[in-house]
Amino acid sequence: MVERSLQASPAGIQAAKAALISLGLNQQKLATRLGVTRQPISKFFNEKSVDRNIFVQICETLKLDWQEITEQPQTNTASDQETDIDALVQAVREQIKPLIKGRCGTMRVLDMTQPIALTGEQGIYTNVNILEKITGRRRLGLEELLQGCDLEEFDRFGLSRVTEKRVPGLEAVKRYSKLMVLGKPGAGKTTFLKYLAMQCIEGNFQADRIPVFITLKSFAEDEDRPNLLTCLARFMTGVYSKTNNYLSQKIDTESLQSIIQQGKLLILLDGLDEVREEDTNRVLRQIRDFSEQWTENQFVMTCRIAAKEYTFEKFIEVEVADFDDEQIRTFVGNWLKCREPGNAEKLTEKLITKLEAHKPIKELATNPLLLTLLCLEFEELLEFPTNRAELYDRGLGVLLSKWDSSRRIERDQVYKRLSLKRKEDLLSQVALTTFKQKDYFFKQRSVEDYIADYIRNLPDAQTDPEALLLDSEAVLKSIESQHGLLIERARGIYSFSHLTFQEYFVAREIVTNSAFEMLVNHLNEKRWREVLLLSVGMLRNADDLLKLIKQAIDQGVAVNKEFQKLLAWAYQKSIHIKTEYKPAAIRASYLNFSGMSFASYIRTTNNSIRIITAELSILIDCRIKNNINSLNYIGGELELDNLIGFMVDNPLDASSCRSFVSTIQKLFSENCQFKQAIQNLEIELHNQTQKEIGDWELCDQYDWRQKLRKVGIKYRDIGHEWEFSDEQQKLFKQYVDANKLLVECLNCDCYVSREVRQEIEDTLLLPIVEIEKYKAAKAAQ
C-alpha cells in the first residue's frame, strides 16, 4: 500500500529552511507558488505529516531530495492516524458530493424557467476577478476620478474606469486562508462561493478538504439557534448517516473534532448582509469565535459592500470586480451554449455586436445579474427592446425589489415609509440635480443634503437638522448596500453605479414634471442625447416634445442666410430626383455632398459632416429599406451628382479619375452639352503620356478638378464651394446632429400621432420658407 502522508526529519527541516532563505521565499510565497493554502506548508516546517504529493512538490521546489529528508517512522501510530483522517475526509467528501452538487451545482435567477449548470461543459460559470483594494476606500479626489474623462465628448466608460489591479478569484482564495468577499448586489458573490464548493468536491481545488456551504440567513433563523460547530456537524452527519453505518459511527464528536483540528474544512459562509438585525450580533460572534479557534481551516465569506461596518481582524477583505469585455463575452457564450447549443457561436457574436452598438446597455452588462437579464431579454426576439426605457425599468425593478424579494430577504427598514415609487422619486431628484451640474461624482455630504431635501417633506419626517442628517446618511447607505444604485467610488465620493441609470432617472424626473424646455435647451450637448431618447420612450404621447424639438432645430438656423441658401439648394436638387426613397433622405444626401466641400472642417473632426449626413439619410428611410448600406449609390442622377462632388473635392490618381469619368458617362447616356464637356475632360486625361501622368498628379490635377467643378456647377448645379465660416460649419454640424437625434426619436419605440410624425418627416431639412409654405397648405386643407 502506498503511504498517504510523509513527514520531514529534523535535519530535513533545517535543510528546507536554508533552501527557503536561499531562494528568497517565505512560507506564504511557497504556498502561492504551489497553489495550495498555507496550512500544509506550516505543517511541513513544524515536523508534521502532510500529503505525499504536496511533500514531494515542496521538496522539488526547494531543490531537495524528498527521500533524503523524509523522517523514517519508528512506529506507524502517527502515520496511521493521518491515514485514518485522510480516509475519513475522502469518505465524507464522497458522501456529501450529492448534497454539494444539489446545493451548488446550478443557478436559477430572475425569470429563468429552469436552472442552469454552474460548471462542466455546459456550465454558465465565468471566472470572477478580485480587487485587493476596496474601490470605495481609495483616497482619491474628484479631480483624480475625472482624470481622462472628457465631459464635452462624453466618454461614458471613462466615468466608471477602475484602474486597480485585478486578481483571479481562485488565486485570491489560494493566497489567503480567511477571505471576506465584498461586492455590489448581483456581482456574483454567491455564484463564486458555489463555484468554490463545486471545484473542491470535484477534486480540482483543495481536494484534501471538505467543502461546507452555509447560507448565513438560514443559519441565523434556525429555530434551534445552533452554534456553528453544531451546524457543521449536522451538515456532515445528517446527510449520510442513514445510508452508511460505518460513517455514522466514525463521524462522532471526536472524529469531527479531529477533522476540524487538522484543518480539513473549506467553510463557505454566504450572505452576511442578509442576516436580520436581531440575529446579527449572535452570528458575528459565532463566526469570529470559530474562525479564531480553528485557524487551520479555510474560510471564505461574502457580504454586500456598505451593508454594515463588520470587523473581522483576521479576514482579508477583497471586492468582486465588474465584468470586463472578455468576461462578458465568456458569460454570453456560456449562456447561449446552455440555451441554444446548436447556434451558440453565431448568437454570441450577434448579442455582443448588439451590446457594442448600444453603449448604455453594455454598461449594464458589467454586472452579472443585469447581464443575465439582458440575455433573457435577447433570447426571445434575438434583439434588445427598441424602447430602452422599458429595459432599464426592468433592470431597476430587479435591483430595487425583485432580487431581494425572490430570496425572501428582509432588509432593515431604514427607508422609513418610502414605497418603491418614493425611492424612485428620490433617486430621480438626486439624478437630475447632479446631472444638471455635470456632477457624475459627488461628495457624500452633498448627496446626503439632496436626500435630506427630499425626505424632510415626507409625512412624519424628522425636523431636527441633526436627526435629518442621520436619516439621510442611513438612507444613502441603504441605497448602496440594498440596491447598489449609488456606490462609493472613493472615500466620501459617490456616483450612480451606472451612468445609464443616472440618465434614466434624469429622464424620469423630466417626464414626471413635463420639463421639456430643459431638454430642448441641451439639444446640442452630447451628454443629454440618451436622456432625450429615454424621455421620448417614457411618454404616453411624445407629440408635444417632438414638435418642440423640431421647432428648436429649425429656429436655430432660421436667421442664417447662408445656411438657408444651402438648405434651399438641397431642396431644389432633391425635387428633381425620382426615387422610392423619402424626399428628406434625398435632401440629407445632398447635404452630404456639400459636406465634402468643408475640407478643413472635415480634417479637424472625428465625426465629419459627411458621416453624419450619410447616417441621417439611412435613418430617415430605415423603416422602408432596412437592407441598404448607403443612399449615396442608388443609381441615376443622385449617384451622378455624388461622383462629381467627390471628384472635385478629393485628389485622385489619373487611373481613378479615368474610371470615375467613364462611370459618369455611362450614368448619363443622353447626348448633350454636359456629356460633351465630360468627354473633353476625359480626352485631357488620355492625352497624358506615362511620364507626364506623374507631373499631372503633382501639379495639374487641381486645375483639371476645377474644370470639372465648373462643368458640374454649370450643367448639374453640383460642386459648389460653400464659403462657410468656422462658426457656420459648427452650426451645420449641430443642425445635422440634432436632426439625426430627432429621427432616432421617431424610429425608437415611442408613441407619436400619425399626423405629427408625417409633418416632421415631410419638413425635415427644409429651409424656413418651405416649412412655412407646407404649414400654410396644411392649414388651408
Image (cartoon, rainbow, N blue to C red):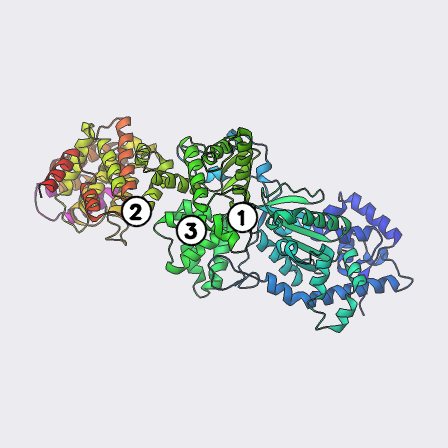
Q: Nearer the viewer, mark 2 or mark 1?
A: 2
**Quadrant, the C terminus:** top left
Identify residue for label 1.
185
Query: Where the N terminus falls, by quadrant?
Result: bottom right
Residue 420: image location, x then y, percent? 45, 46
User: Badge 2: few (under 14), some or many (20 or more) residues near its Cα, within 10 Å?
Assistant: few
Q: Earlier in the sequence, mark 1 or mark 3?
A: 1
Residue range in magenta is 652-676
Q: x, y (%) of residue 568?
A: 15, 35
In-image side of 395 versus 540 (left or right)? right
Q: Which mark is residue 394?
A: 3
Looking at the image, which residue is at 50% across and 55% down?
331
Callout in the foreground (3, 2): 2
Query: Which sits earlier in the primary sequence, circle 3 or circle 2?
Result: 3
In what element is the residue under mark 2? loop
Marked residue nearer the N-terminal end (2 or 1):
1
- Determine whether label 3 and label 2 are within 8 Å by CB: no
Q: Is residue 649 highlighted in magenta?
A: no
Residue 675: percent from left, percent from top: 11, 43
How much space separates mark 2 and mark 1, taking CA atoms? 32 Å
Query: Where is mark 2, residue-wise?
Result: 540
Magenta span: predominant SS is helix
Residue drawn where x is 42% and y is 32% of the image: 438
Residue extending farthest to the front is: 460
Disc 1 is placed on an element classified as loop
Asked if the residue under mark 3 is in contact with the one under mark 1, i.e. CB atoms within 8 Å, the reply is: no
